[in-house]
Amino acid sequence: MIVYESKLEGEQNQYEKLDGAIRTGRFVRNSIIRAWMDNQIKSRNDAYRYCKTLADNPEVPWAKQLNSQARQAHAERAWAAVERFSRNCRAKVQGKKGYPKFKKYQVRDSVEYKVSGWKLSEDRRYLTFTDGFQAGTFKLWGSRNLHYYQLEQIKRVRVVRRQDGYYAQFLIDHKREESKDLTGKKIGLDVGLNHFYTDSFGQKVDNPRFLRKDERKIKKLQRRLSKTEKGSKNRLKARTKLGRAHLKVSRRRNDWVCKLAQRVIRFNDLVAIENLKVRNMIKNHCLAKSISDAAWYRFREWLEYFGVVYGVPLITVNPSYTSQNCSSCGKTVVKTLSTRTHKCLHCGYEADRDENAAINILQLALKQWATTVGRTECEVSGEIPLCLNLETETNKGTRRKRKSKQ
Ligand SMILES: [Zn+2]
């Protein structure tokens, strides 16, 4: 699946109709969660059936206005939340199990259509919504890429509302594969606050300067928001401004990490990274940390994506001890966060702290790779060692040796 996005241009009253569709999508999702809580729904099929019940209910006339497949798409979203929760319960996950919650209003929200309820114009520059909300025709900004695909390949259309407008996302059924020359390089990456990452070759990539700048800007807007009175018009204005700033920051960040990830994948045959828990990362309240964490998380997602596209394995390893162990002899060399160089007392190896960690990450990844993927392959072709045995017995060279012994 690949996703293309275009901005929707229309009239104010059209946007209000899209708001109606988004609100109804949320209503369907929440109704299904409620019905599940009341034990009325026990399976995905029940959830689909419940969509019909909602549409037939005269007390909620808006439910019928939303395209029937779009209703189902939102039922699927609700059911996914329920399934995630029950899966966590079965697996006895420590801590929160993610009990499904009702979704509240927020600016960033979306409504999802499947293959009906919308229509693309012949030249693919206009998108018309044909369901009960009658939102009409929108001009698509940045829809150039849509020309390369057949209409049947568009499996879903999602309308996303953001701080700065409405967007259409087209989910296209297409498997992307790119060829790449072998470079003979394997790389390990260590993340840090001082540098975006340090690799096992000792190269460092710094955080882009705009991250710092954006951080200052967001801080300023946050202060301004907290000074305004609750419920006032100024507060609303300040909130919109802050929301837009966040959006801008995340776009810029995403653009940067996407290009960086593609470069890393294209110039290496294997990439090893630490498996950092997203949950732990998000918990962090320090702004600088949270910004760089978000960037790192996105970076990892792009690495995974490009890894599949270019056929480069991405291996994640347990991050504990990667900075403490010596990458040369494997012994533990305890150091505090402020110690920037790794000096091994046992073997004398000296290196930059992060470089040492990156090498450890790569070594761990290769070990993991050898014991999991490598071993299963060996088991499949189990007859190989036997064949080798036979060969050495009939080998003329060994016979001659035996003769000379006699
Ligand atoms: Zn050592």
Image (tube, rainbow, N blue to C red):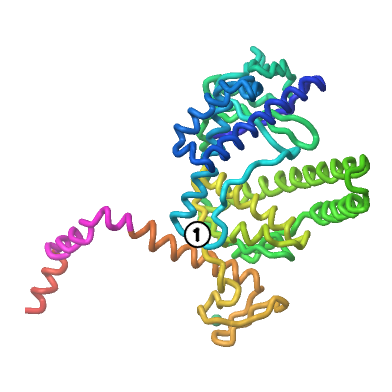
Q: Determine if residue 231 is in view.
A: yes
Q: Determine if residue 127 is in view.
A: no
| Residue 287 shown left or right of residue 297 in the figure | right
Callout 1 secondary element: loop
Q: Which residue is mark 1?
A: 93
Q: Looking at this view, is 115 or 147 the one in front?
A: 115
Query: Horizontal and vertical percent for residue 106?
Result: 74, 40
Crowding around mark 1 (Cα neighbors within 10 Å: few <14, some 14 to 19, many 20+) is: few
Seen as rendered, the residue at the extreme left is: 406
Query: Horizontal and vertical percent for residue 200?
Result: 59, 65
- Residue at figure coordinates x 63%, y 62% from the top left: 280
Query: Horizontal and vertical percent for residue 53?
Result: 53, 25
Quadrant in which residue 71 is drawn: top right
| Residue 149 shown left or right of residue 8 in the figure | left
Task: Identify the magenta region.
Answer: 376-395
Quadrant in which residue 122 is drawn: top right
Main SS, magenta region, reads helix
- Residue at figure coordinates x 54%, y 69% from the top left: 360
Q: Amino acid at mark 1?
A: Val
Quadrant where the image shows the C terminus: bottom left
The correct choice, above or below, for 373 with respect to 78 in the image is: below
The correct choice, above or below, for 114 with respect to 182 in the image is: above
| Residue 128 shown left or right of residue 330 in the figure | right
The correct choice, above or below, for 384 with respect to 326 in the image is: above
- Residue at figure coordinates x 74%, y 46% from the top left: 250
- Magenta-drawn stretch contains 339: no
| Residue 107 shown left or right of residue 375 in the figure | right
Query: Horizontal and vertical percent for residue 270?
Result: 51, 55
